[in-house]
Amino acid sequence: MDQIVSLRPLFAVLVSMLVIPILLSSAKRPNVREAWTFIAGLIKFGLVVSMLPAVLQGREFVFTLSTPFPGVPIALQVDSLGMLFALVASFLWIFTSLYSIGYMRGLDEHAQTRFFAFFALALSSTIGVAFSANLFTLYLFYEILSLCTYPLVVHHQDQKARISGRKYLAFILGTSVGLVLPGMLYCYHLAGTLDFTAAGILAGEASPPVLIFLFFVFLFGFAKAGIMPFHSWLPAAMVAPTPVSALLHAVAVVKVGVFSIVRVSTGIFGVDLLKSLALGPAVATVASITILLGSLIALSQDELKRRLAFSTVSQLSYIVLGIALLTPKGMLGGVLHIAMHAFGKITLFFCAGAIMVATGKKYISQMGGLGRIMPVTLGAFFIGSLSVIGLPPTGGFFSKWNLLLGAIAADQIVFAGVLLASSFLNAFYFLPIVFKGFFAAAPAGEAASGIQEAPMCCVVPLVITAGISIALFFYPHIFMN
Amino acid sequence: MMSAHYPALLILFPLLASFINAAFLWVDRRLCFPVAVLGMAGSLYCAGQLLVQVLAAGQVSYRFGGWAPPMGIELVIDELNILVLVIISAVALINLIASKRSIHAELGIKDATFYVIYLLFVTGILGVTATADLFNLYVLIEIASLASYALLAMGNQDRAPWASLNYVFLGVIGASFYLLGVGYIYIMTGSLNMGDVQGLLPPIMHSPAITVAFVFCLIGVWIKMALFPLHGWLPNAYTYAPVSASRVIAPLMTKVMIYVMIRIMLSVFGYAYVFEQLDLQKWIVLLASVAIMAGAFMALAQKDLKKMLVYIIVCEVGYMVGGAWLGNVQGMTGAILHIINDALMTFALFLVLGNILFMQRKVSFDDMQGLFSAMPWTMAGFVLAGVSIIGVPPTCGFFSKWYLLLGGIQAGAWVFVAALVLSSLVSAVLVFRVVENGFFPPEQAEHSGHAHHQPAVINEAPATMLGSLGLISAGLIGIGLWSGVLVQKVILPFVHQGMN
């Protein structure tokens, strides 16, 4: 394959890290600080986009930083899969920054400089994961991401945040140090390399039981993907300010987990090896359990953000399921779902945060009649729900459609059933919120006030992401290539 | 020609500075600090020059007074010890600069005396690292040890003298074991020069006397490096010492003794004897695994930062002993790389400790609540050094852990691998317990939920202490990213030569 040695991937990773000193030094002037966040966001997105044409032509950007171990460099490589993820993450960062301004100022949060600084660092490591050329580089950025999101999760610095922060680190760091690190070393011991290659590196290096064991070590080790039983950090992480939940715990961090699993499946093991090990159905079963249980638990949650979190747990496993089907359609559906779910779910989180800023309401039971107060927000919530459920006219339809086709092509009708059942469950836990919001009466004792939306900084991003969810229905080809 | 005398000057600079300072005690105490800095800077310069020489020409050998070994005294600087020498002289110099403010606060008028003994200690460990003579090694260990007994005893006057006395007893026992071992070697070979002994040993390798000699040397060194269960002297000695002293003794003394162990294994007795004839490595790796877990869990039981760090050292000693005894190239590489990395990591952690002690006087976990807002830079240094202890890339701790784990996997030493992974998890708990305490405001001051807007009062350590920490923190990442070069250019040539 045609490779271009270029510093561009490195700059795309580093730009949000380099802006941190400027953010810190302009702590006293919030407007200047936020301006710099936008500048960094635009440069980052611009750099990613600038590599798009060449990647679409099938070329790859590569850059090697240093070689700490023989055969294992710290290296970046931009291919189409990484490109897709980087595009989504860096694009949504710009809108999340706008939303953060409205949210953080609307709630008069403390330590905003720290918030924006660690947010920028988190984006650096996310793009780093997307552009990693080998498992070691991926692990490096994965760990940095784990650490730099901790101050964001425990932002409120109260007792609840303390407990959630512990849970967050215990799951995320415990699995990556306890499972991924030894697994990665064992891979290196077997293959002598950790590069992602189309054919995988492990074929024929060890006996099938060992390889199967190794695969499950990775599957559960990347706990950011929220596969049960390593999912409970995600609902706990909802104590974070909503922009964090929106971008990091619906898009960046969780997708990094899934992305890592995709990379290991396709680049380390390789589809052929997974087929010969007959791992598909086993992994698909693990994913299906998470899909169904996640949806069922989401039904029972009254706190809106927690319901969204369990929905995310469930939706993430769609992507894993898509990979596990080991058919081209399934893969396409899974990878598409990285993008489609991102736009849908970030809209839902933006709405949840906007409701909190405007009315202070966190619980679904309080949200009757809300549509008369916040029609725009709830309308966007409706669109986001449709996309996550997978109904037209939203982008989510295409990823689910391909997943279904993939399941049928793989002769795995059971999993097609799982997908459909979960879609029904999704509808059951999302649509009543919208329905009651528009048609039910407001809770007793609440005076009917006029339209009272959140600040513009909050509303504009969620309208845009909702709009994009619809646009993706008509132009899904942006990601399909 | 100066350049031919760097090996000797490396050791003589701090020694002379120490003597000069002893004289200045009667003239003007204020002169002691600059002289000490000059002495250490000279030493660091020599170490740097020697590094260049070793990279260019391999081994550098120096004969005192021109007497040829085995009769004369020889210093040998090769790929193994040059890194240790650079680290020792750099850490000792930086600590000296960081100590200027804190040592005066801790010891008052005795600070000048401190410099004299401190320089003697550094002379001792530099000599231990550079010498190629088994008996000189003993003498220099004793110089370093005696100096460290004195330094450690200068601390908390209720406890430090007792802790130090305890250390004296065990230290003397360790030294005696080592000396006995050397005596056996001398009886059997008639030589004390390492290279010479290595040449004389193969024909008499099967003699039980040689086994006794080796085991005695090993036990002596183990006591000095505080390998579990021979670690009893270490926790109290380091805890009650003045922090300016423990800050340099804790990272360096144990590492130097690990260097001595590797030197004796590979450059005196040799691979064939240690790994092929003696059938001990399985048991020693097991012992090291136990040491790792014991150190980790004892650290977990502590309630203040100082004691926690002290037990982390006990844990890390197990890493290096285990790696060295895996009997393969990866494990040995990991052990040697970890000498460097661990010296830097623990030094960074002790610098953090020193900063906090200097500003707050207290380091129990309860007293550290909300410390991030008061000392953000110091705590940032703690986080960096802490994740290096856990082994998170790109900090240097990850890279040596990589080799150690890989060595363990290759050797099939699964207990050791499990101990490494488990202790990493335990150190994650250790580090984040402190981070959590520092990050969250003190409980009584905690307001309901968010939005406590009172501006943080920053009360950071002086620039010299903060600068030292910054320098070492940068080193943690720098050494990490460039560890590939370090391993390829310096460590592997020695390991390949020593392990066949």
Image (tube, coloured by chain):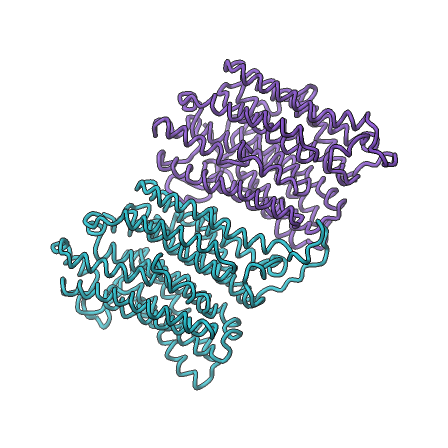
Chain colours: A purple, B cyan
Q: Quadrant of the C terminus of chain A?
A: top right
Where does the image place residue B366, in percent across and percent down from the top left?
58, 59
Residue B235 falls left or right of residue A480: left
Is residue B52 visible in this depiction of the protein?
A: no
Q: Which image quadrant for residue A438? A: top right
Q: Is residue B235 left or right of residue A371?
A: left
Residue A96's quadrant in the figure? top right
State the residue at coordinates (76%, 26%): A434
Of residues B21 and A251, which is closer to you in this image? Answer: A251
Foreground pick, A78 / A443: A443
Residue A365 picture location, percent across and down: 75, 32
Q: Which residue, as the protein is rendered here, is positioned at the far left?
A: B203
Q: Nearer the viewer, residue A209 or B297?
A: B297
Q: Is residue A193 left or right of residue A447?
A: left
Q: Is residue A441 above or below residue A242?
A: above
Q: Position of residue B21 (x, y in %)?
A: 41, 79
- Furthest residue to the bottom? B26
Q: Nearer the viewer, residue A440 or B382?
A: A440
Tally of numbered discs: 0
User: Picture coordinates of residue A370 (x, y %)?
Assistant: 80, 32
- Quadrant of image for the N terminus of chain A: top left
